[in-house]
Amino acid sequence: MSNPFFLFSHEKQGIALGILAQNLGPYQGAVAYLSKQLDTAAKGWPGCLRAVAAVAINIQEAHKFTLGQKMTVLVSHTMSAVLEAKGGHWLSPQRFLNYQAILVEQDDVEIVVANTVKPASFLSESMGEPVIHDCLETIEATYSSLPDLKGTLLEDADTWFTDGSSYVVSGRRHAGYAVTTSKEVIESGPIPTNTSAQKAEIIALI
């Protein structure tokens, strides 16, 4: 039990996956394979934050085997940066403090960002190509407003009007949409008769 432990942590489809290993000659020898579902709230987070949740789960499960021995955790995400910068937007204060205690404040745990993204690569120590991934940039790009969506009017822009409707005449439902200027119809057409008025307006906007 004097050999330090290595924990490979990964999240896939809402499941925290991990391999706990120790050095056995030139290779890493598996001590335990870890697998546990994330809770419902965590499953709805961005991928990088799901990875944070997975690491927290895997570290807690690994502690059942390490019994206080030094453990190096290999991840492909910048855990502390994601937690500090984005944790407050998605995590409750209680969960944030819990993750911080697990990931940052334990003397027997060291988290290392590595190129390993597959369990087989971890056990064979085949690190592969560098993982080019910026967690903060990825979260911003995925969940922020569209960069070309502005709150001010465009200069010299054309003014178009859209409308969609769904109504019943003589027992038959009709639905359609139109895009016009103040002088002419740009585009119009029928849409499926089971379309609601609200959906018809959305179709017109698209």
Image (spheres, rainbow, N blue to C red):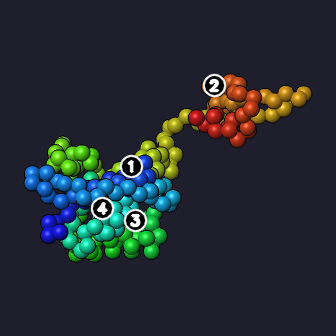
Picture quarter with the N terminus = bottom left
- Say whether marks 3 and 2 touch (CB < 8 Å): no
Asked which quadrant contains residue 4, the reply is bottom left
185 over 106 or under it: above or below: above
User: Mark 2: which amino acid?
Assistant: Glu
What amino acid type should be assigned to the residue bearing mark 4? Met
Q: Secondary structure at mark 2?
A: strand
| Total marks placed | 4
Answer few, some or many: residues within 10 Å of disc 3's Cα (few below 14, many 20 plus, some between 14 and 19).
Answer: many
Q: Which badge, 3 or 1, is on the more N-terminal residue? A: 1
Residue kind at label 3, given as amino acid type: Gly
- Label located before the other in sequence (4 or 2): 4
Secondary structure of the residue carrying tag 4 is: helix
Residue 98, horizontal then vertical, whole percent:
39, 73
Residue 35, picture quadrant: bottom left
Q: For mark 2, what is the residue?
A: 187
- 4 or 3: mark nearer the eye: 4
**Which residue bears the numbered disc 4?**
79
Q: How packed is label 1: few (under 14 Cα within 10 Å), some, or many (20 or more)?
A: few
In the rendered image, is residue 54 in sight? Answer: yes
Label 4, label 3: how far apart the Cα atoms are: 10 Å
Using the numbered discs, state the Cα–Cα distance from disc 3 to disc 1 in whole angstroms.
Answer: 20 Å
Q: Calculate the distance from the C-alpha at mark 3 to the C-alpha at mark 2.
A: 46 Å
How far is the residue under mark 1 from the one under mark 4? Answer: 16 Å
Q: Which residue type carries mark 1?
A: Lys
Considering only order in the chain, which callout, 4 or 1, is on the residue closer to the N terminus?
1
Residue holding disc 3: 87
